[in-house]
Image (cartoon, rainbow, N blue to C red):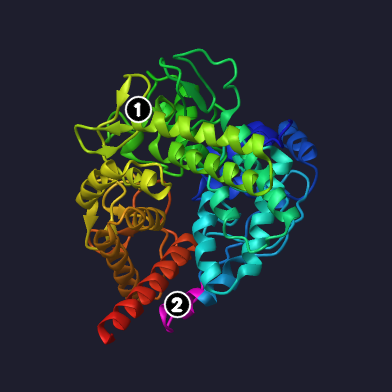
């Protein structure tokens, strides 16, 4: 399948000149610009008379590209938090998008909700957590539209890209489509068969290359361990700087001439596919981003989600009378579950963790991803209880940390993220760890509400140690924010339901 070229490939030396000149504070700005005329004509004019002066280059860019508009922020909220989130949905909702030649945006046939701020397009795993809130806001219409949009992407590209930009097409995101599909209220046979086929397309993407893989080898996103077990890793098909962070990626490679630049860029891109961009989880040296080695790790969250996908396919196929498919995927899920227990469990430490391919052993680092086997229902009950005890070590005043390492990366201390709170709360409850689940949820909601009362805003991430908006990473803190809105609203609703049940028991 031929994919649309990203701006870095389409405009080549012009793209590089603009990024090196630092015409825009954010590398993503020019990557999202829309050409005013045919890209080939723009590039030809620039090559005929390339300008090196920053002022002249800026003039050329403005004459030939429409830069993304500064949408600004919604005014700080004064109403109750739940009401403010309901007011945010229209602000974050985008109409169907028809694209023009040469722009990086991908066409989107239906309405969809974006995260906010610099994230002005649809993002894959973000959207599941956003949709949790849409359901609770009574916006099932938007949920169904977004499920259909992701189905369109699977039909068009054979996978769901990281986001709806050409520069995201070489990678995906944590595979949560099966969780989105479960939110649909369309129970017709045609819709159910459509969702089943979309799940199978996604599974083929993640498992591509498995057939001829010898023990000890890896290909793209799949690895066969020496004992024959199959597990997955994050990957990206382009060993090049990310368009949206081009300047940062080039600078990192130039500052580390001892490391192969293409290999470094692939590791950064694979880290971006994980959604954890970036974290000490992927680094040999927590203080050195250039030590990133994402593709050497078989992540516990990814493999738990793929186990969930395989079970979902088996269940949906069984309900639709496709016995052969149901049996095949039930067997695949069972095999993956056994591989997770064998290779992604750290018995000495007492929690699930990533498997290090290069070192042939399970990693020792505890991260919030350890909750995924509980959330996806693959954990053994005794190991789930030990994992819960370990996860309690990540608990801070505002909720769970991503990791306890202070590295300066955004998926590390002191930051906590809405998706990890939801995964942990739901996973803990599934294994009867209700008190810890309630504690995590209560701390998160209390922090978000307190920060909202102080600032009128919701943040992409939070400093759960000091209970304020988070920082770190490659870009300025973003407000809005889709998945924070969705998870917080869902946890608030659960808290109210729990309080109602406890009140009924007390009254009884």
Q: Position of residue 15 (x, y in %)?
A: 62, 37
Q: In the depicted view, which residue is nearer to us: 499 or 55?
A: 499
Q: Is residue 357 visible?
A: yes
| Position of 196 relative to 341 (above/below) | below
Left/right placement of residue 45 relative to residue 74 reads right
* Dot 1 crowding, Cα within 10 Å, few <14, some 14–19, many 20+: many
Circle 1 or circle 2, nearest the eye: 1
Residue 474 is tagged as none
Looking at the rendered structure, the number of numbered marks drawn on it comes to: 2
Marks 1 and 2 sit apart, C-alpha to C-alpha, by: 42 Å
Q: Position of residue 334 (x, y in %)?
A: 47, 34
**Quadrant the C terminus occupies:** bottom left
Q: Secondary structure at mark 2?
A: helix
Q: Secondary structure at mark 1?
A: helix
Residue appearing at x 52%, y 45% in the figure: 27
Q: Which residue is mark 1?
A: 343
Q: Is residue 89 magenta?
A: no
Q: Position of residue 377 (x, y in %)?
A: 41, 46
Left/right placement of residue 217 relative to residue 146 reads left
Left/right placement of residue 97 relative to residue 114 reads right
Residue appearing at x 51%, y 73% in the figure: 74
Q: Is residue 76 magenta?
A: yes
Q: In the depicted view, which residue is nearer to us: 104 or 111?
A: 111
Residue appearing at x 33%, y 59% in the figure: 462
Q: Which residue is mark 2?
A: 82
Q: Is residue 21 visible?
A: no
Residue range corresponding to the magenta coloring: 74-85
* Dot 2 crowding, Cα within 10 Å, few <14, some 14–19, many 20+: some
């Amino acid at each position: 399948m031929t994919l649309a070229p990203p701006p870095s490939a389409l405009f080549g030396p012009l793209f590089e000149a603009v990024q090196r000149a630092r015409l825009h504070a954010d590398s993503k700005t020019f990557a999202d610009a829309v050409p005013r005329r045919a890209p080939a004509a723009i590039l030809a004019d620039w090559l005929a008379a390339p300008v090196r002066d920053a002022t002249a280059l800026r003039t050329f860019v403005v004459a030939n590209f429409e830069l993304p508009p500064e949408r600004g922020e919604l005014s700080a909220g004064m109403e109750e938090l739940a009401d403010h989130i309901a007011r945010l949905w229209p602000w974050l909702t985008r109409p169907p998008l028809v694209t023009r030649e040469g722009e990086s945006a991908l066409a989107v046939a239906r309405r969809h909700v974006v995260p906010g701020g610099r994230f002005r397009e649809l993002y894959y795993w973000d959207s599941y957590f956003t949709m949790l809130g849409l359901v609770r806001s009574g916006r099932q219409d938007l949920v169904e539209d977004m499920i259909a949009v992701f189905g369109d992407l699977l039909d068009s590209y054979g996978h769901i890209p990281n986001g709806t930009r050409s520069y995201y097409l070489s990678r995906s995101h944590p595979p949560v489509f099966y969780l989105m599909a479960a939110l649909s209220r369309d129970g017709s046979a045609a819709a159910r068969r459509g969702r089943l086929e979309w799940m199978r397309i996604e599974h083929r993407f993640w498992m591509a290359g498995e057939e001829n893989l010898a023990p000890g080898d890896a290909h793209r996103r799949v690895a066969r361990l020496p004992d024959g077990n199959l597990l997955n890793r994050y990957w990206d098909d382009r060993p090049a700087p990310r368009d949206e962070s081009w300047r940062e990626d080039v600078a990192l490679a130039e500052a580390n001439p001892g490391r192969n630049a293409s290999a470094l860029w692939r590791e950064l891109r694979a880290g971006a596919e994980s959604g954890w961009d970036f974290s000490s989880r992927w680094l040999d040296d927590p203080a050195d981003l250039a030590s990133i080695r994402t593709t050497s790790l078989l992540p516990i969250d990814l493999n738990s989600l793929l186990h969930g996908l395989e079970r979902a396919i088996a269940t949906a196929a069984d309900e639709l009378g496709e016995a052969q498919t149901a049996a095949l995927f039930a067997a695949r899920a069972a095999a993956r579950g056994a591989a997770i227990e064998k290779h992604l469990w750290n018995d000495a430490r007492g929690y699930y963790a990533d498997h290090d391919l290069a070192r042939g052993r399970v990693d020792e680092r505890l991260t919030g991803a350890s909750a995924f086997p509980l959330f996806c229902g693959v954990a053994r009950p005794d190991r789930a209880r030990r994992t819960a005890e370990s996860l309690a070590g990540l608990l801070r005043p505002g909720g769970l940390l991503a990791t306890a390492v202070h590295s300066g990366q955004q998926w590390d201390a002191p930051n906590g993220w809405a998706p990890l709170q939801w995964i942990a709360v739901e996973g803990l409850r599934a294994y009867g760890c209700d008190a810890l689940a309630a504690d995590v949820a209560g701390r998160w909601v209390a922090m978000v509400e307190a920060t909202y009362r102080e600032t009128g805003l919701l943040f992409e991430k939070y400093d759960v140690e000091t209970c304020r908006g988070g920082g770190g990473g490659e870009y300025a803190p973003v407000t809005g924010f889709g998945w924070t809105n969705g998870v917080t609203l869902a946890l608030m609703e659960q808290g109210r339901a729990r309080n109602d049940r406890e009140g009924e028991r007390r009254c009884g």
